[in-house]
Amino acid sequence: MPALVLLGAQWGDEGKGKATDLLGGSVDYVVRYQGGNNAGHTVVVGDQKYALHLLPSGILSPGCTPVIGNGVVVDPAVLLSELSGLNERGVDTSKLLLSGNAHLITPYNITVDKVTERFLGKRKIGTTGRGIGPTYADKINRVGIRVQDLYDESILTQKVEAALDVKNQLLTKLYNRRAIEAGQVVEELLGYADQIKGYVADTTLILNNALDEDKVVLFEGGQGTLLDIDHGTYPFVTSSNPTAGGACTGTGVGPTKISRVIGILKAYTTRVGAGPFPTELFDEDGEALRRIGGERGVTTGRDRRCGWFDAVIARYATRVNGLTDFFLTKLDVLTGWEQIPVCVAYEIDGKRVEELPYSQSDFHHAKPIYETLPGWSEDITKAKSFSDLPKNAQNYVKALEEMSGAQISAIGVGPGRDETIEINSFLS
């Protein structure tokens, strides 16, 4: 049976939660492999809406085991709060597995994140202020705190003291903040140990054994391709690898076991935070996309920047992820436009460029070259098959597929769990 990677093919917020949830009833494990509670998924089940930030979307599927992999950074307070909220709504969270190798977001990581962003002023990155970046920095600098450290107080204390030796110098001498006491941090972290102990496991072993037993495993990325620390619009990116390669390093499952890579594409384009965005709209169309699409960040609460579909970005996502399929979401949002522009290339220094430029400066100066496709006015939310769509909607999907370089295998025609057209099965 297949191991699938599901990830965002734009700047995040493409609707991965709905796609993951759609597959969740057919798979045995759903695994978050990177990011933290800076990512958000909205999943609609019947008349119930769930906003997930750290937990895998598969936690809403009764037969599925949700897993937080070693590549994720975990704020234990957020984890427990999210679990409590779901339990209060009758969702069974007892099957959750949490990698003992995942790194913990500490109180000082959050403090450093916030004061650093304020210090940058106009040069700020647009971080969510949740400590994600500083936690990944600690991981790379080998002064991070892992989940397993909660169960050895001596090691935990040594690691916290070592991390604060440098951070307190930074906080007091550069940012004019008070030093953080190591003992208080250790006490707070130890307070979470018993509460999460039942979830902690060797998830790498469990997932590899599951695949050897022909179980279906779905790897779920947190943000989008263009926010990847290596392959995104650096420095306006996240601090981890949401691209397909991150699924391997973030779970300990080798690449030869992955059989399908699915990219989630919104039928237009959005992003949150600072950074270049060639097709961004500042007019009535941009406001209409924001209003009709409900474009407000699930985790950040910030309005998303909106623009027309960018085929250059879609082709790039296909290339760097090795995408086999696309799940096109929010097609219904475009209903009502007589003409729909699609960016097919960029103009940079007077030249037509059809691939994403590797130079940050070039991308900042990229101007979209549009082709205009005829729109449709018919309600598509009740469509159950591709042939149910208006002819112009069908042509729009076919054009995006041809421009993007991978087959569109599913289409979201509304926010509900059942408002999806499946063209090709992801599990075949």
Image (cartoon, rainbow, N blue to C red):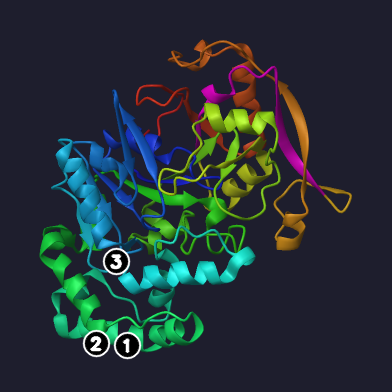
Q: Are marks 3 and 2 in contact (CB under 8 Å)?
A: no
* Amino acid type at mark 1: Ala
Mark identifier at residue 302:
none
Circle 1 residue: 162
Q: What amino acid is at disc 2?
A: Gln
In this orientation, does residue 173 appear? yes
Q: Specify whether residue 203 is in view.
A: no
What mark, if any, has residue 102 been given in the picture?
3
* Left or right: 39 in relation to 330: left
Q: Nearer the viewer, residue 361 or 19?
A: 361
Coordinates of residue 78 in the picture (x, y in percent) = 27, 56
The quadrant in which residue 204 appears is bottom left
- In the image, is residue 145 part of the stretch drawn in magenta? no
Query: Tag 2 or tag 3, which sits nearer the N-term?
Result: 3
Give residue 293's position: percent from left, percent from top. 52, 30
> Which element type, helix, strand or loop, lies under badge 3?
loop
> Magenta residues?
326-347
